[in-house]
Amino acid sequence: MVDETENGALGAVIRRSATRHAAPSDLRQGIHAAVTQSAPPGKARGWPGWRWLQMAGTLACAILASVLITRISLAPADAVRVNDEVIAAHVRSLMVAHLEDIASSDQHTVKPWFAGKLDFSPPVNDFSNQGFPLTGGRLDYIDKRFAAALVYRRHGHVINVFVWPVRDANMAKASSETRDGFNLVAWSASGLQFWLVSDVNSEELQTFSKLLRDVPR
């Protein structure tokens, strides 16, 4: 069961991070001009239906402004939500000692394990020679769908690599940041979204992300 306190904290983060915008002035002026032109010639102000048209125009402005605010604010709020979900999944895997459903450093063992469990095939590679050994994988749940979680190590630190299909172009943009003491790197490739999270320093995580991105698809 999800703790109500955690829900409240997440809601506060989303409200704090969401961007709000007023409707552009040219949009308001355009609607006003359209309403004015629809009144009978010479009766714009005296016409009995004028007040109703004014009210309709104001309502239309409010609705369009609401749509614009929703569309503009949705992407930042969703990004915050997914960031929080990725960090929570990472921490949860460490707390309950459930890093791997399949524990193996052999990519040819880990990759087939996901077959039939997911509706996509996550790329699995071992980077032991570069200092980032694969230790296994598991199923997780991110952004309202099942995701692959690939587990790597770096000098005793755990790196979780979450992979799932891209569903929103706004979420597919490359990014990197530090939140709550964890470093995150995200990008998309070949229709898949990749999210890396770890407490290794940002330079090492960027190095690892480049190894993953440079693998031929």
Image (cartoon, rainbow, N blue to C red):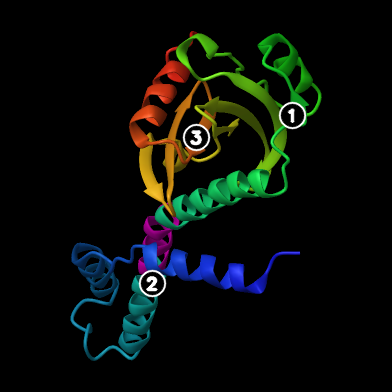
Residue 112: in sight, yes or no? yes
Nearer the observer: mark 3 or 1; the answer is 3
Residue beneath the point at 43% across and 23% down: 208
Identify the image quadrant of residue 94.
Answer: top right
Identify the image quadrant of residue 151.
Answer: top right
Q: Pointer 1: what residue? A: 118
Check disc 1 and give the amino acid type.
Leu
Decide if residue 50 is on the left or right side of residue 141. Answer: left
Which is more toward the observer, 138 or 143? 138
Which is more toward the observer, 41 or 85? 85
Q: Earlier in the sequence, mark 3 or mark 2?
A: 2
Check disc 2 and give the amino acid type.
Ala
* SS at circle 1: loop
Indicate whether 107 appears above or below 78: above
Q: Work out which quarter of the rendered image holds the N terminus and state it.
A: bottom right
**Which residues, given as a range, are shown in magenta?**
65-75
Q: Pointer 2: what residue? A: 60
Decide if residue 89 is on the left or right side of residue 12. Answer: right
Decide if residue 70 is on the left or right side of residue 10. Answer: left
* SS at circle 3: strand
Q: Pointer 3: what residue? A: 196
Q: CA distance from mark 3 to mark 1?
A: 19 Å
Q: CA distance from mark 3 to mark 2?
A: 43 Å
Principal secondary structure, stretch drawn in magenta: helix
Which is more toward the observer, 3 or 143? 3
Q: Earlier in the sequence, mark 3 or mark 1?
A: 1
Residue 217: in sight, yes or no? no
